Amino acid sequence: MKEKLLPTIFLLALFIGDDVIAELAAPLQEHIKQETKAYSATEKTMLQQWSDGKLISEFFCQKHALQVLSKTYEGADRVFMSLSDDDPPTLITETRIKGNGSARYKDGWVDFTYECEIDKNSGKVTDFTFAESTKQ
């Protein structure tokens, strides 16, 4: 007799070195789908190429990051949640990402590392922490 599985989202996490790969929570996928309804076919194709970490960073964390960073860096008006396509934000749980970003403020640019947690049902940021990156 086969067991009947209830439709449940299972979190799959694979550990590769220090990186954790997780699956994006279904409610967050739905938030993104709703947000992008009016996007063109070209824009939607581009979004399909983005990692889940990049989707969370752009759709949920970016605005909140700018609010937080502007309290520390006077005149902060622009934030990038990824420093390169080769190093996108990483999904470490179904609702939490970590990454490297950069913000423009009155004295120039500042690079930082960050973690951002999202409530999977509301899509609201519940935690955002950052630390200024040191130049090597």
Image (cartoon, grey):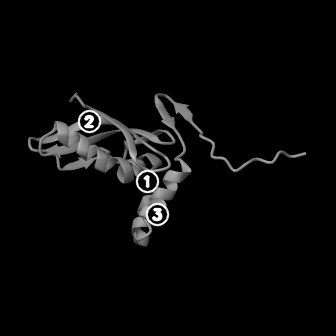
Residue ID at (35%, 47%): 61
Residue ID at (32%, 45%): 82
Q: Nearer the viewer, mark 3 or mark 1?
A: 3
Q: The residue tagged with tag 2: helix, strand or loop?
A: strand
Which residue is labeled 3 in the image?
A: 34
Q: Quadrant of the N terminus?
A: top right
Number of numbered discs present?
Answer: 3
Q: The residue tagged with tag 1: helix, strand or loop?
A: loop
Indicate left or right for 87 with 12 as reference: left
Q: Position of residue 69 (x, y in %)?
A: 22, 40
Indicate left or right for 20 with 113 as reference: right
Q: In this orientation, which residue lies closer to the viewer: 12 or 64?
A: 64
Residue ID at (42%, 62%): 35
Q: Position of residue 120 (x, y in %)?
A: 49, 47
> Which label is found at residue 50?
1
Amino acid type, callout 3:
Gln
Indicate left or right for 43 with 9 as reference: left
**N-term mark: 3 or 1:** 3
Amino acid type, callout 2:
Phe
**Mark 3 touching mark 1, by CB under 8 A?**
no
Instruction: Using the image, determine if residue 16 lies above or below residue 86.
Output: above
Q: Position of residue 104 (x, y in %)?
A: 17, 46
Cα–Cα gap, marks 2 and 1: 21 Å
Q: The residue tagged with tag 3: helix, strand or loop?
A: helix
**N-term mark: 2 or 1:** 1
Cα–Cα gap, marks 3 and 2: 30 Å
Residue ID at (73%, 48%): 6
Q: In this orientation, which residue lies closer to the viewer: 90 or 33?
A: 33
Q: Position of residue 127 (x, y in %)?
A: 37, 37
Residue 98 picture quarter: top left
Which residue is labeled 2 in the image?
A: 112
